[in-house]
Amino acid sequence: MSPPRPDLVIQGLGKRFGATVALADVDLRLPGGSLVCFVGPSGCGKTTLLRVIAGLETPSEGKVFLGERDLTRVPVHRRDVGMVFQSYALFPHLSVAENVAYGLRIRGVPRRTRLERAQELLALVQLPDVGSRRVSQLSGGMRQRVAMARALALDPALFLLDEPLSALDAKLREGMQVELRRLQRRVGITTIIVTHDQEEAMTMADLVVVMGDNRVQQVGPPLDIYRRPVNRFVAGFVGSNNFLPGRVVSPGQVEVAGVRAPLARDAAPAPLGGEVTVAVRPENLRLRAQAPAAVALHGTVVFVRDLGRVVETRVRVADQELIVSGRGGFDEGDGVWVELPESGVVALTS
Ligand SMILES: Nc1ncnc2c1ncn2[C@@H]1O[C@H](COP(=O)(O)OP(=O)(O)OP(=O)(O)O)[C@@H](O)[C@H]1O
Ligand SMILES: [Mg+2]
């Protein structure tokens, strides 16, 4: 059995460019062998964090460890990382196989061995027959797979990808998300993928790191982040949400829009009596023509949109508008009851 892969540990990391704070107070432990996604809006520091991990940027403060090994001062070529960027950065004058084997050539691996290895890697990324072609003859999706094969050629300890799929069209991107996930499972290398697409992060990752405001906002498995966001930023960034002002009236109960609703087990417990923001997912609300036994809010349908798979209904409740996604069946102007989830709503304090 191969030894377990070490965790990647980041401690008290910060990075400034002049007066610009690109990263502050980053503490992370990423389990060896996992697939991690860094996700967040533009400018929140995702690329900077990945570059610090790769050794392409020196942090202003803090440390990076791979297991016991302090990488903070280790130069990029000694860090044992394979990287893939948004643009493929392949050598156009080399064949596909020569591109994949490039790192091996630099290391002085004999031609035959390295071309065999390139062939193996091309099979791994589902491109077994293109080794002798020129890069210019490949589609964008194929090029990105070649770039992945090249990054994996030296069997790195860390596989780092910065928005690797963002240049691809939506259909191809979906296919590649699945492929990349399967590829990572096969090779088992600790992998970090930067994306600003939260859906991409949610479908691929074992662990999602949500970044915002140049800090880490929340770290967790995708479903935890979805069900128990720690603050309003995360609740709004990952999936869609309805937000309403509320107040915690008893442990496990919140007053919202004139009713008392049960509280879900939150990531950040709200204090008794405190003002909170109540978050409830559109798919967790149900529309009823008659007052249901469960806790519900009465309102008027103001807009209906049939999205094929689901119907999105907007309901005005007092001075708020709620989005409900489900089976629909109501028209603009209808009076409806919006049933709150029995499993409870989420109360956010920040
Ligand atoms: N070399 C640099 N010099 C000066 N400022 C920089 C440099 N690199 C990044 N920054 C700044 O640091 C902050 C974080 O940038 P970064 O590229 O890490 O964000 P990002 O999350 O990757 O954004 P995007 O989704 O747009 O790629 C931004 O304010 C950016 O302008
Ligand atoms: Mg970036």
Image (cartoon, rainbow, N blue to C red):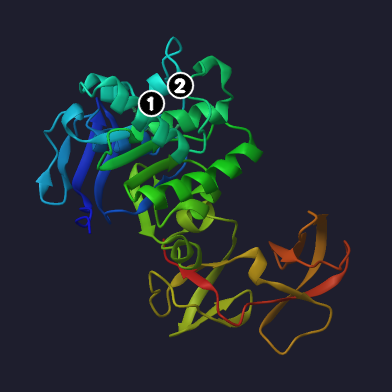
**In the rendered structure, which amino acid carries the disc numbered 2?**
Val
| Residue 220 visible | yes
Residue 198 rendering spot, x and y as whole percentages: 52, 48
Provide the secondary structure element on which disc 1 rests.
helix
**Disc assigned to residue 100:** 1
**Disc assigned to residue 243:** none
The residue positioned 26% from the left and 35% from the top of the image is 81
Residue tagged by mark 2? 96
> Looking at this view, is 323 or 103 the one in front?
103
Marks 1,2: beta carbons within 8 A: yes
Q: Looking at the image, is 244 positioned above or below residue 263?
A: above
Neighbours of disc 2 within 10 Å: few (<14), some (14-19), many (20+): many
The residue positioned 58% from the left and 83% from the top of the image is 260
Q: Mark 2 and ligand 2: say if the CB distance to the nearest ligand atom is below 8 Å.
A: no
In this view, the residue farthest toward the front is 112
Q: Looking at the image, is 249 positioned above or below residue 11?
A: below
Q: Mark 1 and ligand 2: say if the CB distance to the nearest ligand atom is below 8 Å.
A: no
